[in-house]
Image (spheres, grey):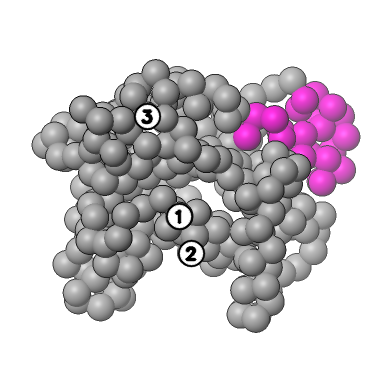
């Protein structure tokens, strides 16, 4: 892929970050909220299982393995050997019948069509990937191509209209002021990232035969609390569930969804 930083597929930029990403970030309250909220949003648009799902840049499977548990046929594609190793470890903890519904493939998203041998999917997911690419168009080409006629394309990426939120919450006021007019930042994992707007991404998929259906926020209040220094306990399941319910509702409403630092766009491919 044409990454902001990295290079060819052989340069695994995630090798040193996989544990922090898969074991820590997703195990936090914010990570749990992200998985829950995206899952609920997806279920609003997916057909019943066992519809085939392709998760491009699926990492350790946090988003697609719950779909496999729900009965979907999941193909997870990722260029990082370290991420795929982590995905395999997590997959082995699931029941055998769930494991049989998951295929792991190593490939760049920009080669997804070739990697899946031209197979078409009822849903194509790409969550948290576009922001690591200098140019999103080649990957979006592949996402839209891999979707079957009538299939869903689901993309989550950074919100360019909310770039000042993080530095403001961290009281980095000079950075916050400068962020109103920028599209990139060093993310919480220390990796450079780039953001998009809903309108721009909608136009890109529409030009490739995918009609945007709806867009959502992903998280809001947990983000603000984290950056302001509040400690949220992921072991408090009752509190986590209550938090996730609030975040899900906020993700569907203005003005809350507009302030989320990431957004989730869902579109449907037209007939062939």
Between the residue at mark 3 and the residue at mark 2, the CA separation in whole angstroms equals 34 Å
**Residue 44 bears which disc, if any?**
1
Q: Which callout, 2 or 1, points to the residue nearer the camera? A: 1
Count neighbours of disc 3 (C-alpha within 10 A) and say few if under 14, some if 14 to 19, many if 20 or more. many
**Residue 124 bears which disc, if any?**
none
Task: Read off the magenta span.
Answer: 159-180
- Look at the image and tell me whether residue 252 can be seen: yes
Between the residue at mark 3 and the residue at mark 1, the CA separation in whole angstroms equals 17 Å
Snapshot quadrant of residue 10: top left
Residues at marks 3 and 1 touching, judged by CB atoms closer than 8 Å: no
Residue, disc 3: 210
Residue, disc 2: 23
Relative to residue 212, is residue 86 depicted above or below? below
Residues at marks 2 and 1 touching, judged by CB atoms closer than 8 Å: no
Between the residue at mark 2 and the residue at mark 1, the CA separation in whole angstroms equals 28 Å
- Taking the spot 17% from the left edge, 67% from the top edge, the residue there is 100
């Amino acid at each position: 892929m044409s990454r902001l930083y990295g290079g060819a597929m052989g340069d695994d930029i995630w090798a040193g970050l996989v544990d922090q990403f898969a074991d820590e970030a997703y195990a936090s309250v914010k990570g749990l909220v992200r998985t829950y909220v995206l899952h609920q949003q997806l279920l609003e648009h997916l057909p019943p299982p066992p519809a085939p799902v392709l998760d491009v840049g699926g990492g350790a499977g946090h988003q697609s393995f719950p779909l496999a548990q729900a009965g979907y046929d999941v193909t997870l594609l990722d260029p990082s050997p370290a991420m795929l190793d982590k995905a395999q470890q997590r997959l082995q903890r699931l029941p055998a019948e769930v494991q049989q519904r998951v295929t792991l493939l190593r490939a760049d998203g920009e080669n997804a069509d070739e990697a899946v041998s031209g197979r078409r999917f009822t849903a194509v997911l790409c969550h948290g990937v576009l922001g690591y690419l200098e140019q999103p168009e080649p990957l979006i080409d592949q996402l839209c191509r891999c979707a079957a006629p009538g299939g869903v394309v689901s993309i989550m990426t950074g919100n360019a209209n909310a770039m000042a939120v993080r530095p403001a919450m961290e009281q980095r006021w000079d950075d916050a002021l400068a962020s109103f007019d920028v599209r990139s930042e060093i993310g919480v994992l220390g990796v450079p990232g780039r953001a998009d707007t809903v309108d721009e991404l909608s136009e890109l998929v529409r030009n490739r035969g995918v009609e945007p259906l709806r867009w959502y926020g992903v998280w809001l209040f947990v983000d603000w609390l984290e950056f302001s220094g509040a400690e949220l306990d992921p072991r408090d399941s009752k509190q986590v569930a209550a938090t996730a319910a609030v975040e899900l509702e906020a993700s569907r409403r203005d003005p809350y969804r507009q302030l989320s630092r990431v957004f989730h766009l869902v579109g449907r491919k037209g007939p062939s």
